Image: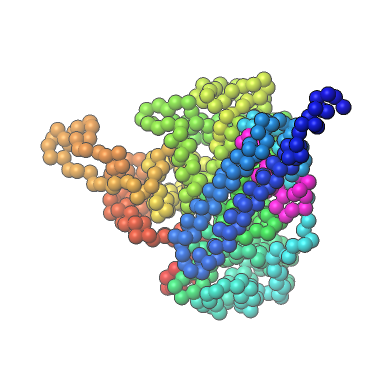
């Protein structure tokens, strides 16, 4: 034993020698408080739905998003108090990582516990890249599954009939009745039988329905799968709570329909999850083309979704031919955007400076992205994940792309040896810019996209969001043909805008003035001016104006503001409502 070790053993109290254990305990307790708060809010979703408390449901969705940072901040502060001067000792954190790994072995949410630990270490060290000594890099740990009740209920039948559907719908313990159960059961059974015979032929079928209900906005979703003849078919049954009771609103039985419901442009579901990984694996069985990170994010675990996204990204970059490229579309004035073609993601870096007419700041741009994160995105705003201190192989950047990034965002991007370090970056799913889509698509697809562009603006208005720059280049088309907005520079609350008619000129000088001859406030908006940039050109113009001409009228915007001001929560659903199930009930 050295003299230093002997002296330390004499002077160090048992309390000090146990600091790693106490620090790990503090992290675990903060993580547990987060999960308890998360689950408490999630459990309220059923009551909100049964009581038609849509405003409360929206408040819960926003409140739950704030929990992670609150408890992460608490964990970082507790660890700093406990470790004091030793808080930056990596050897100590390596021991803490080992202790944490042992403590969470066998837990059903072990991957989430690992991610929370990583969040603490990255906050403390501001780690560039990753540090395998003090971070969990994956794969996720094995857990014990035998002591959990089944994730789903299984129903077997020779064919889909009303009795089978009544059994399925009746298995969920609602405190309110179905409004027309017998009628819904007959229609749903007919749709299931037709779809399964078309997609899987004849023979007995098995239906496996998840016991947990997925809640979002004004809808509740029963999610399962149908197996017939070796074929797996998704089964998603959206329910709405009308004034007379619960009704089935649609029956979704394709991978694309399920994928849109779980899409990246919608708010996260509130769903009770006993075993996150098992639930994600079930969902992956009906949406095989959706990445694991997107499924974790869709069920509310967006921080672990980031972890999975990073792991997948690093896997792609390990391939010898992996190369970043310029993103498709016009160059933005605020963001430098590049992509990894094989990965279906774009990377957005805030530029060092913004040219005219942009009048904003870096912090204002970051505030816009946070605004989108906490708002109800109603399927029309791309979800963005923020990363800090990422490190990429230099070989993955073509010279022209790297020169461009260093030129416009040199305060964020730097080269260190054979690595490119990015201080901050946002990731979003890649979509086709709408102006490019309309240029290249056939007539029918272009018409559908142009009309959905108008729907996107109206859906966002219904959620109290005004997009500001309603240029075609700021919107994109997903692989399922849905139009979303991905440029957030000018987003604001619709309720804060002042929609006005253009004053009529009173003289020839006013009529031909190059500048407005009347007062224009910062929040003033003149819908009559939208025609110049909102309405698509050419053959699409008439179709767009026929359906969305009211976007050019002050009355549309003011009426939307009035309804929002009265507390109305608009209906916006991620599917086409079934004509066979339509009824006159008021939702």
Please name the colour scheme applied to the rendered image.
rainbow
Looking at this view, is 364 or 519 the one in front?
Answer: 364
* Residue 37 quadrant: bottom right
Q: Residue at point 46% right, 71% down?
A: 242
Horizontal and vertical percent position of residue 400 = 57, 22
Pinpoint residue 522: horizontal percent, then vertical percent: 30, 39
Viewer-side residue, 218 vs 34:
34
Q: Reply yes or no: does residue 166 show up in magenta.
A: no
| Image quadrant assignment for residue 55 | bottom left
Q: Is residue 87 left or right of residue 546?
A: right
Q: Quadrant of residue 202?
A: bottom right
Apparent side of residue 178 relative to residue 243 in the rendered image (left or right): right
540 vs 508: above or below: below
Q: Quadrant of the N terminus?
A: top right
- Residue at the image position 59 percent from the left and 70 percent from the top: 191
- Residue 112 among those drawn in magenta: yes
Q: Main secondary structure of the magenta part?
A: helix
In the displayed image of the protein, which residue is found farthest to the left?
Answer: 507
Q: Position of residue 386 (x, y in %)?
A: 56, 38
Up/down of 186 relative to 198, above or below: below
Q: Quadrant of the C terminus?
A: bottom left
Q: Nearer the viewer, residue 332 or 18?
A: 18
Q: Is residue 277 left or right of residue 479?
A: right
Looking at the picture, how far across and down is residue 533, in whole percent? 35, 40
Boundaries of the magenta span? 101-124
Visible in this render: residue 329? Answer: yes
Q: Is residue 257 visible?
A: no
């Amino acid at each position: 034993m050295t003299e230093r070790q002997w002296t330390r053993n004499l002077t160090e109290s048992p309390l000090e020698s146990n600091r790693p254990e106490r620090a790990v305990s503090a992290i675990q307790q903060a993580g547990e408080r987060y999960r308890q708060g998360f689950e408490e809010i999630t459990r309220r979703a059923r009551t909100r739905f049964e009581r038609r408390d849509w405003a409360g449901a929206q408040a819960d969705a926003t409140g739950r998003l704030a929990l992670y940072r609150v408890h992460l901040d608490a964990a970082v502060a507790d660890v700093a108090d406990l470790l004091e001067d030793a808080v930056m000792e990596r050897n100590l954190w390596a021991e803490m990582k080992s202790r944490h790994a042992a403590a969470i072995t066998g837990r059903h949410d072990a991957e989430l516990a690992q991610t929370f630990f990583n969040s603490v270490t990255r906050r403390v060290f501001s780690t560039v890249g990753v540090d395998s000594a003090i971070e969990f890099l994956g794969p996720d740990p094995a857990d014990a599954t035998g002591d959990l009740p089944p994730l789903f209920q299984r129903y077997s039948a020779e064919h889909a009939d009303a009795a089978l559907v009544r059994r399925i719908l009746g298995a969920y313990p609602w405190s309110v009745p179905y409004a027309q159960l017998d009628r819904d059961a007959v229609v749903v059974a007919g749709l299931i039988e037709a779809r399964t015979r078309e997609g899987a032929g004849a023979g007995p079928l098995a239906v496996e329905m998840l016991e947990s209900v997925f809640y979002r906005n004004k809808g509740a979703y029963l999610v399962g799968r149908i197996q017939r003849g070796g074929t797996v078919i998704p089964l998603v049954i959206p329910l709405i709570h009308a004034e007379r009771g619960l009704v089935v609103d649609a029956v979704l039985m394709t991978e694309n329909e399920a994928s849109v419901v779980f899409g990246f442009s919608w708010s996260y579901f509130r769903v009770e999850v006993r075993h996150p990984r098992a639930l994600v694996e079930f969902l992956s069985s009906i949406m095989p083309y959706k990445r694991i990170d997107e499924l974790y994010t869709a069920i509310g675990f967006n921080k672990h979704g980031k972890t999975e996204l990073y792991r997948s990204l690093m896997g792609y970059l390990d391939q010898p031919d992996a190369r970043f490229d310029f993103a498709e579309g016009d160059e933005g004035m605020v963001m430098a955007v590049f992509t990894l073609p094989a990965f279906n993601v774009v990377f957005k870096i805030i530029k060092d400076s913004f040219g005219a007419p942009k009048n904003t700041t870096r912090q204002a741009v970051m505030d816009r992205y946070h605004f989108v994160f906490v708002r109800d995105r109603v399927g029309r705003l791309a979800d963005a994940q923020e990363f800090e201190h990422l490190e990429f192989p230099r070989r993955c950047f073509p010279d022209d792309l790297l020169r461009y990034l260093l030129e416009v965002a040199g305060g964020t991007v730097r080269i260190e040896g054979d690595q490119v370090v990015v201080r901050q970056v946002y990731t979003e799913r890649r979509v086709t810019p709408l102006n490019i889509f309309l240029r290249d698509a056939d007539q029918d697809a272009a018409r559908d996209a142009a009309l959905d562009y108008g729907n996107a603006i109206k859906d966002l208005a219904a959620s109290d969001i005004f997009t500001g720059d309603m240029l075609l280049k700021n919107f994109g088309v997903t692989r399922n043909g849905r139009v979303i907005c991905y440029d957030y520079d000018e987003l604001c609350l619709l309720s804060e805008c002042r929609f006005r008619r253009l004053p009529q000129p009173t003289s020839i000088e006013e009529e031909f003035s190059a500048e407005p001859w009347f007062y224009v406030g910062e929040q003033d908006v003149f819908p009559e001016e939208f025609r110049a940039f909102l309405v698509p050109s050419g053959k699409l113009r008439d179709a767009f104006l026929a359906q969305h001409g009211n976007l050019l009228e002050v009355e549309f915007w003011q009426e939307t503001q009035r309804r929002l001001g009265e507390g109305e929560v608009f209906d916006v659903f991620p599917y086409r409502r079934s004509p066979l199930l339509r009824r006159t009930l008021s939702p």
